[in-house]
C-alpha cells in the first residue's frame, strides 16, 4: 500500500508539473503573439497611411512626439461636368468623402496642388464623358475650386495624428480624443522620428509576464522584420 501510494503521489506530482509547464508555455506563446500583433498593427497602419504621403507636406512629427498627417481616404479623377461651385469625380477609396471630417487636395493641369474644403458630396450617374470604371463611384463634390487651370485629380483626406502614448498605439481625428488601435503593450521607449525623408518608428513592446520588452525599429518604405 505504501509503495502504491508513493507511486501515485509521484505520478500526481509529475502530472501537476506537466500541467503547470503547459499553462506557462501556452501563456508565453499567447503573450508573444499579442506583442507581435501590436507591432504588425503599427507597421500595417502606418505603411498604408504614408504610402502616398510626403514628409513636410503631408506628415510631420510634432514637438510632443505625435505624428500629424493628412490621412488620405481616396482619390477621384475629374470628369467633364457642369459648373456651379463644384466638380464631378470618379471616386475610388476606402470610404466616401464626408464634409464634416474631410478636405481635399486638387491637382491642376499646371502641376500645382490646391487645398479646398468640402461643402457637400452627392452620388451622381455622371455626365457624358465620365467613364466610371470598376470599383469607382461618380460623385458631385461641391466646394472644390473651378477657377484657374483645369483640375485633373482630387485627393480626399482627413486631418489626424497617431501617438505611441498611454501604453497603446492611438489615433486622434481632428481635435477629438485619442482612440486606441492596439492593446496596452507599448512602452515609454517608443516614439516617432525623422530619418532623411522617411518616418522612423521605434517600438518597445512590453511583456507583462516577465517585465521585459522587445524593441523594434522600422523605417517607412522598408520591409518590417519581425521575429
Image (cartoon, rainbow, N blue to C red):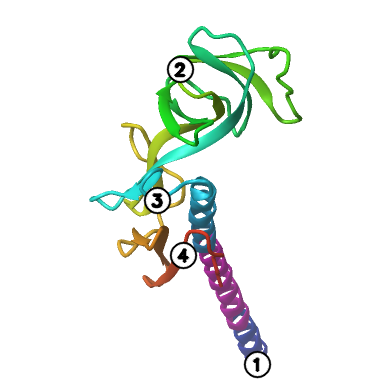
Q: Mark 1 points at which residue?
A: 3
Residue 156 visible, this angle: yes
Sort mark 1 into few (<14), some (14-19) or many (20+) by Cα contacts within 10 Å: few
Label 4: which secondary element: strand
Q: Residue at x 55, y 69 (%)?
A: 225
Which of the labelled discs sits on residue 127, or is there none? none
Relative vertical location of residue 25 with respect to residue 45 in this rendering, above or below: below
Q: Which of 115 and 164 is in front in this view?
A: 115
Left or right of 10: which side holds 114? left
Instruction: Please provide percent x and percent y for residue 98.
Output: 49, 22
Q: Is residue 15 magenta?
A: yes
Badge count: 4
Q: Nearer the viewer, residue 75 or 179?
A: 75
Which numbered disc flags the more N-terminal residue, 2 or 3?
Answer: 3
- Please state which of the two labelled residues, at mark 1 or mark 4, is closer to the viewer: 4
Which numbered disc flags the more N-terminal residue, 1 or 4?
Answer: 1
- Please state which of the two labelled residues, at mark 2 or mark 4, is closer to the viewer: 2
Give the spatial CA distance, label 1 vs label 4.
61 Å
Left or right of 108: which side holds 11? right
Residue farthest along the bottom direction in this orientation: 3
Sort mark 2 into few (<14), some (14-19) or many (20+) by Cα contacts within 10 Å: few
Q: Nearer the viewer, residue 100 or 119?
A: 119
Relative vertical location of residue 226 with respect to residue 148 in this rendering, above or below: below
Q: Name the residue under label 3.
A: 55
Q: Mark 2 points at which residue?
A: 147
Which of the labelled discs sits on residue 218, or is there none? 4
Which residues are the magenta region? 13-34
Label 1: which secondary element: helix
Amino acid at each position: 500500500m505504501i509503495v502504491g501510494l508513493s507511486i501515485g503521489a509521484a505520478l500526481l506530482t509529475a502530472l501537476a508539473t506537466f500541467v503547470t509547464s503547459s499553462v506557462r508555455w501556452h501563456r508565453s506563446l499567447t503573450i508573444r503573439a499579442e506583442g507581435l500583433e501590436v507591432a504588425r498593427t503599427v507597421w500595417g497602419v502606418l505603411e498604408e497611411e504614408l504610402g502616398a504621403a510626403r514628409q513636410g507636406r503631408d506628415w510631420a512629427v510634432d514637438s510632443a512626439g505625435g505624428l500629424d498627417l493628412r490621412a488620405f481616404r481616396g482619390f477621384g479623377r475629374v470628369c467633364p461636368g457642369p459648373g456651379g461651385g463644384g466638380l464631378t469625380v470618379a471616386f475610388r477609396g476606402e470610404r466616401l468623402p464626408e464634409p464634416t471630417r474631410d478636405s481635399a487636395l486638387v491637382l491642376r493641369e499646371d502641376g500645382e496642388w490646391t487645398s479646398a474644403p468640402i461643402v457637400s458630396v452627392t452620388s451622381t450617374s455622371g455626365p457624358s464623358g465620365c467613364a466610371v470604371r470598376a470599383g469607382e463611384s461618380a460623385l458631385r463634390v461641391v466646394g472644390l475650386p473651378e477657377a484657374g487651370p483645369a483640375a485633373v485629380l482630387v485627393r480626399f483626406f482627413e486631418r489626424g495624428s497617431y501617438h505611441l502614448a498611454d501604453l497603446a498605439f492611438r489615433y486622434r481625428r481632428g481635435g477629438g480624443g485619442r482612440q486606441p488601435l492596439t492593446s496596452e503593450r507599448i512602452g515609454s521607449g517608443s516614439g516617432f522620428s525623422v530619418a532623411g525623408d522617411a518616418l522612423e518608428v521605434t517600438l518597445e513592446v512590453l511583456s507583462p509576464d516577465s517585465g521585459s520588452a522587445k524593441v523594434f525599429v522600422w523605417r517607412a518604405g522598408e520591409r518590417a522584420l519581425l521575429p
